[in-house]
Image (spheres, grey):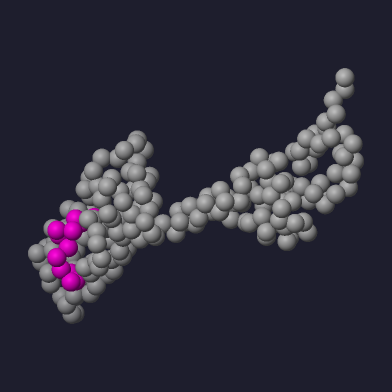
């Protein structure tokens, strides 16, 4: 007995032989590649695809399921996760690359190995005048609740400090070895905490 199904190479759909010719004349067939390309982007809703193609949202939903894509709610959840990853602070991106498990709470705070971590930004600060003028890094005391704070330095590295070492309003230090320790000379020891990833514990998976 001959098969009653035919496969559309363009739309990648299996159809009844009776309806195959009608399908090849439809807007779904003519724009099949475009529909699939948009369905592959989870942040484009079924309603938006329907508006662009000229179909109903329900028809797009049916096509998505036939083509093997997730339902609308799953697509929205994946989209939210993708957006959060794109907005994620660089410290958490680097932590993930090093094998740490990162549980995002927002764009600037997350749990890493059970420790509440936040990211802030350090900036250059000039101290002194004339030939006694030197440039140091300036960091401010972070606000809010945290266990570990990471300041991103202008050169891309991170100063990673536990809460017990952040009892200052603002301080400056030289990140490199120098005979000049700056106005707040007691803070020069912070340089040993630059790229101090061990403060987060051990990575839970290999790089």
Which residue lies most toward the bottom here?
A: 129
Residue 166 part of the magenta segment: yes
The answer to which quarter of the image holds residue 160 is bottom left
Could you tell me if residue 57 is visible in this image? yes
- Residue 179 lies, in percent from the top left, at 12, 63
- Residue 167 lies, in percent from the top left, at 14, 65
The answer to which quarter of the image holds residue 166 is bottom left
The stretch of residues the image draws in magenta is 160-171
Residue at coordinates 24% horizontally, 62% vertically from top-left? 145
Residue nearer the viewer, 192 or 101: 101
Could you tell me if residue 91 is visible in this image? no
Which residue lies most toward the left here?
A: 186
- Residue 195 lies, in percent from the top left, at 25, 51
Q: Is residue 12 found left or right of 41 in the rendered image?
A: right
Q: Is residue 54 placed above or below 131 in the rendered structure?
A: above
Q: Is residue 31 found left or right of 49 in the rendered image?
A: right
Residue at coordinates 12% horizontally, 69% vertically from top-left? 184
Residue at coordinates 10% horizontally, 66% vertically from top-left? 185
Residue nearer the viewer, 195 or 96: 96
Which residue lies most toward the top here?
A: 1
Residue nearer the viewer, 166 or 132: 166
Q: Is residue 98 placed above or below 192 in the rendered structure?
A: above
Q: Is residue 12 placed above or below 1 in the rendered structure?
A: below
- Residue 199 lies, in percent from the top left, at 21, 48
């Amino acid at each position: 007995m001959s098969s009653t199904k035919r496969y559309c190479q363009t739309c990648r759909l299996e159809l009844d032989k009776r309806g195959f010719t009608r399908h090849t004349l439809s807007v779904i067939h003519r724009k099949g590649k475009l529909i699939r390309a948009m369905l592959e982007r989870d942040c484009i809703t079924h309603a938006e695809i329907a508006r662009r193609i000229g179909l109903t949202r329900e028809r797009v939903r049916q096509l998505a399921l036939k083509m093997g894509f997730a339902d609308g709610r799953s697509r929205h959840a994946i989209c939210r996760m993708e957006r959060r990853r794109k907005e994620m602070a660089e410290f958490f991106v680097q932590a993930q690359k090093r094998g740490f498990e990162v549980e995002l709470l927002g764009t600037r705070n997350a749990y890493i190995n059970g420790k509440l971590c936040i990211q802030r930004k350090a900036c250059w600060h000039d101290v002194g005048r004339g030939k006694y003028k030197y440039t140091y890094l300036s960091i401010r005391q972070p606000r809010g609740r945290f266990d570990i704070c990471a300041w991103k330095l202008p050169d891309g590295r991170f100063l990673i400090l536990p809460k017990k070492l952040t009892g200052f309003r603002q301080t400056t230090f030289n990140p490199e070895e120098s005979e000049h320790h700056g106005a707040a000379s007691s803070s020069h020891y912070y340089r040993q905490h630059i790229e101090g990833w061990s403060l987060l514990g051990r990575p839970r998976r290999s790089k």
